[in-house]
Image (tube, rainbow, N blue to C red):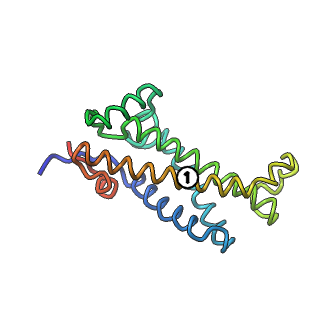
Amino acid sequence: MEHQIKVWDIFIRSFHWVLVILFSLEFLIDDDFLELHSTIGYIILGLLLTRIIYGFLGSEYARFSNFIYNIDEIFTYVKSVFNFKAKRFIGHNPAGGAMVLILIAALLLTSFTGLLALGFEERQGPLVPVLDYFPFWVFSVAEELHEAFAYVTMLLVIIHVTGVLIESIVHGENLIRSMITGRKNG
């Protein structure tokens, strides 16, 4: 058996899989069960904010500084993947690191527009006290934006999973198992 390296700590693995479950539930229940949808949305927002803090203070491979690359490095890496010449990374590769940031941004936008829609339509949530400071047009499109960001996020998830599967093939390692066990081959 090859030497194993601990890469993903328990916080990152738990965050990842809890987020997978909660976003899937949110996507499935939509706003048919508004109270449950809102509660799960608040939990997702809390998870995201915690992950952002952990991105600065967490373990080595969880820190943003470990996987933020410039746009040229990202495109060069993606091209090398399709040529089957991609360099292997212990933590996030340039494409994976970019996807983490994009997914966090998409989920934050989904959460914020959800809070706007909830505040405007139901007069509930933490944004109610500041609703008067937003232009009215924001509220008239908040629910549509919330739904659009949810679908964009789902598309990003599909791209992410596809990338993980491609990377697993290119480098001959099971990255899904790595996100469960926290370990990768050395």
Q: Residue at x 33, y 58 (%)?
A: 180
Which of the 4 image quadrants contains residue 59?
top left
Q: Report the front residue among 121 and 56.
A: 121
In this view, the residue in front, 75 or 110, is: 75
Identify the residue at image location x=82%, y=64%.
123
Q: Amino acid at mark 1?
A: Thr
Q: Position of residue 40 (x, y in %)?
A: 60, 65
Q: Is residue 175 left or right of residue 154?
A: left
Q: Secondary structure at mark 1?
A: helix
Q: Position of residue 94 (x, y in %)?
A: 40, 35
Question: Residue placed at 33% from the left, 51% from the top?
Answer: 165
Residue farthest toward the bottom in the current orientation of the protein: 33
Quadrant housing the C terminus: top left
* Residue 30, horizontal then vertical, whole percent: 63, 67
The structure residue drawn at horizontal position 32% and vertical position 37%, both measured from the top left corner, is: 82
Which residue in the structure is indicated by mark 1? 153
Relative to 137, does residue 57 appear above or below in the rendering? above
Q: How many marks?
A: 1
Which class describes the residues within 10 Å of circle 1: few (<14), some (14-19), or many (20+)?
many
Picture quarter containing residue 62?
A: top left
Looking at the picture, tell me which residue is in the foreground, 22 or 130. 22
Q: Residue furthest front?
A: 83
Left or right of residue 103, residue 184 in this image = left
Asked if residue 140 lies left or right of residue 109, the reply is right
